Image (tube, rainbow, N blue to C red):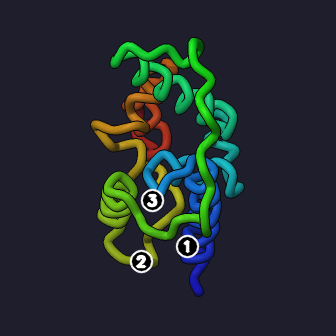
Amino acid sequence: MAAIDHYLNTVIQHARLEAFDDGSATLEAHHLLLGIAVAGENAELIAAGLGPDQIRAALQGEFEHSLQTVGVSAAAYRLPKPTRVGDPPTSLGASAKLAFDRAFSRARTKKELRPVHLLLGILQAEIGTVPRALALAGFDRPALIARFSGDPA
């Protein structure tokens, strides 16, 4: 098994646990982002302010903002913890599939595929939970993409 296979397997295993903790039936891009953040080799993420705690805070902010848009204050209600039934999910949701598609399109062959390609595949989403969470938390997504792709900002 190639090093990239081990890395992807590790990220997916962490993402499955994140999705399970969320009560989600599928793995989504934000679970993959958290999987990358907790899987190790994340010094660059932490340097960019995207450690696991910062990502979780950004996602919580996005969740609360989404509730507010429909007139619900998360502070006014004690929302129950997600129900965890069965095993962590194994199915990829649409946002995760698109992140993998974008990641794989960055490399011509599997040998050229690197961990950063998955991160870029997640960050390049124009719509969805991750770009909303990053924007609400004050992150400049295009600058993050430039930083991780090695392009000058």
Q: Are marks 1 and 2 in contact (CB under 8 Å)?
A: yes
Residue at which label 2 appears = 110
Between 56 and 124, the one lying in front of the other is: 56
**Residue drawn at (56%, 29%) of the image:** 60
Between 146 and 55, the one lying in front of the other is: 55
Q: Are marks 1 and 3 in contact (CB under 8 Å)?
A: no
Horizontally, residue 120 falls left or right of residue 125, namely: right
Q: Gap in Å between the C-alphas at discs 1 and 3?
A: 22 Å
Q: Foreground mark, 1 or 3?
A: 3
Amino acid marked by disc 1: Ile
Instruction: Give the SS element for disc 2.
Output: helix
Amino acid marked by disc 3: Thr
Residue at which label 3 appears = 26
Quarter of the image containing the C terminus?
top left
Horizontally, residue 59 falls left or right of residue 38, namely: left
Q: Vertical placement of 146 versus 70: above or below?
A: below
Nearer the N terminus, badge 1 or badge 3? 1
Residue at which label 1 appears = 4
Q: Position of residue 114 (x, y in %)?
A: 50, 64
Quarter of the image containing the N terminus?
bottom right
Instruction: Give the SS element for disc 1.
Output: helix
Nearer the N terminus, badge 2 or badge 3? 3
Q: Gap in Å between the C-alphas at discs 2 and 3?
A: 25 Å
Instruction: Give the SS element for disc 3.
Output: loop
Task: Quadrant for residue 58, please give it.
Answer: top right
Between 12 and 106, the one lying in front of the other is: 12
